[in-house]
Image: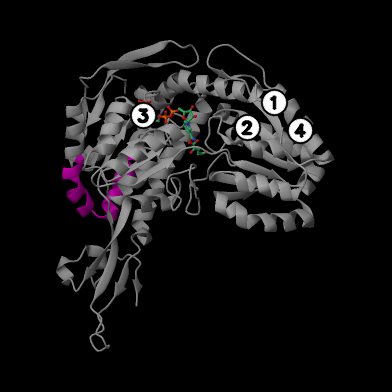
Amino acid sequence: MSVSGEMILAGRPTRGEGAPFAASNPATGSAIAPDFPTATRDDLERACAAADDALAPFRALGPADRALFLDRIAEELAADANAIVERAMAETGLPRPRLEGELARTMNQLRLFGRVLREGAYLDIRVNKALPDRTPPRPDIRLSMVPVGPVAVFGASNFPLAFSVAGGDTASALAAGCPVVVKAHSSHPGTSELVAKAVARAAAACGLPDGVFSMLFGNGADIGAGLVADPRIQAVGFTGSRAGGTALIAIAQARPQPIPVYAEMSSINPVLLLSGALEQRGEAIGKAFAAALTLGAGQFCTNPGLLLAVEGQGLDSFVSSAAAAIRATTPATMLNRGIHRAYCAGVRRLASHPAVTPLAQGVSGDGWVCQTALFTVSARDFLAHPELHEEVFGACSLLVRCRDAVELRTVLAALEGQLTVAIHAEGADDQAQAAWLLPLVERKAGRILFDGFGTGVEVCDAMVHGGPFPATSDVRTTSVGSLAIARFLRPVCYQNTPDTLLPAELRDANPLNLPRTCR
Ligand SMILES: NC(=O)C1=CN([C@@H]2O[C@H](COP(=O)(O)OP(=O)(O)OC[C@H]3O[C@@H](n4cnc5c(N)ncnc54)[C@H](OP(=O)(O)O)[C@@H]3O)[C@@H](O)[C@H]2O)C=CC1
Ligand SMILES: O=C(O)CCC(=O)C(=O)O
């Protein structure tokens, strides 16, 4: 399958009529053919109208048939795997093994939601049968989940497959029964086209209504903002910058009918290095930290951007080992000019900050490459300068040196919400300190992990990839793992409803054989 510059408009390959743009190869800075004409307001209108029309028939399909659709998307992606990976390599500068792994993860996510649909627990079916003899009598009351309606998904630049056109947001929204309109990320339009065509082929093969899936090219301020404002869109999935996420939240809140925006934005993922762990294995943790920091040029929202540790010999051995590993890191190509520019500006800001001292820098290079950087600051200065708490997206981290555990806790308390907090602990004293810190850690992050780093999110039932603002805009949810489907469902209760009028999953005979709570 070749890239031709087409969007998917209500299930069909369509050439936009708006101003065209081209992708750039971040390794060379040169444009990659072809041009991608963008969507017009009319295209946006058609995509949203078709999505709205598709809602009822897509819901009526039932979980088992939607599972077949998700499995079929995975098959279509597998059939086009080589073309998708090669185009993504050219558009993102990410290496083949990373993209092959990401494609496999994308297919597994789709299949995971297929399993979720077949198991049926996501519907949280509750049946309270009538109690006519009770005083007062209880009516028959039954609850199930329904799709919220058409969902807008914004592809992320840093995961061109797993968080993009057929990524976790799209997979979980489709699984919930919501038609999806994707606003493609302009950094990888060719990859987006290939993936969108795979989704469209799957939809056609499953005989689904046209409007179940659309994917539009266009800039954020116009097509992106228009999509969130469209009255037919009922929820938004987004991964990207804090500025972008908060802009979309403002648009969604200003609508006559406000809607939820599930935005995953900014996180510096504090790593707490407790004294016992540093004394026992400071050197090994230093090496492991440098590897986690530089993975994918640090372009992960789970990147370890902040280290908190108490001064001492263990910390010294951590620092010398991490610094040596960082000095040896070769420059890696970043995703695009904007992300490279923002990274360089962030590193310059830290380097020129009077309270901050550089500890190590990686090898530098030409072009849009990431030169790894590690800085340090005292806890006192960190607390006095909130601007040091901001994310620098890329392989840059800041070590906060604390006088004692109480000061470390004070620093942690001053931080904003996070996706992850990692704790390195060894021995009884560290365990006791971790137990003392955990209630605070729980308030800060959606995922707490021991003796590791947050990069590399497992896609499974127990995963939480979320957290308090600004990590995400809704602390109650996750964008990775099977619980992500809950973002796109809402409960509906049926009272004294004739059996034949109930959704199949609520009928007395339980024809779909799904689990239910009956009391
Ligand atoms: N924490 C994280 O997980 C991530 C953080 N980032 C951060 O984001 C920066 C830029 O990266 P990028 O991926 O382009 O993220 P952006 O947030 O800039 O863009 C993401 C998507 O949102 C759209 N968008 C952005 N602003 C608006 C707006 N005001 N109204 C409507 N749509 C909008 C963009 O459209 P368009 O580009 O067409 O305008 C794009 O499709 C990085 O330097 C990094 O700091 C990036 C990726 C992940
Ligand atoms: O590490 C992961 O797999 C998830 C990363 C992520 O969500 C992001 O970087 O935007």
Q: Is residue 335 visible?
A: no
Q: Secondary structure at mark 3?
A: loop
Label 1 and label 2: CA atoms lie apart by 9 Å
Q: Is residue 94 visible?
A: yes
The quadrant in which residue 1 appears is top left
Residue under label 3, please give it: 80
Amino acid type of disc 1?
A: Ile
Is disc 2's CB within 8 Å of ligand 2? no
Is mark 1 in CB contact (under 8 Å) with mark 2? yes
Q: Secondary structure at mark 2?
A: helix
Amino acid type of disc 2?
A: Leu
Label 2 and label 4: CA atoms lie apart by 14 Å
Residue 349 shown left or right of residue 39 in the figure: right
Amino acid type of disc 4?
A: Val
Reading the chain from its start, which is encountered first: label 1 or label 4?
4
Residue under label 1, please give it: 326
Front residue of this view, candidates 11 and 496: 496
- For the record, the magenta segment spans 51-74
Reading the chain from its start, which is encountered first: label 2 or label 4?
2
* Magenta highlight on residue 502: no
Front residue of this view, candidates 330 and 431: 431
Above or below: residue 3 compared with residue 166: above
Of badges 3 and 4, the one in the foreground is 4
Residue under label 4, please give it: 319
Q: Residues within 10 Å of mark 3 (few under 14, many from 20)?
A: some
Reading the chain from its start, which is encountered first: label 3 or label 1?
3
Reading the chain from its start, which is encountered first: label 2 or label 3?
3
Which label was assigned to residue 293?
Answer: 2
Of badges 2 and 4, the one in the foreground is 4
Label 3 and label 1: CA atoms lie apart by 37 Å
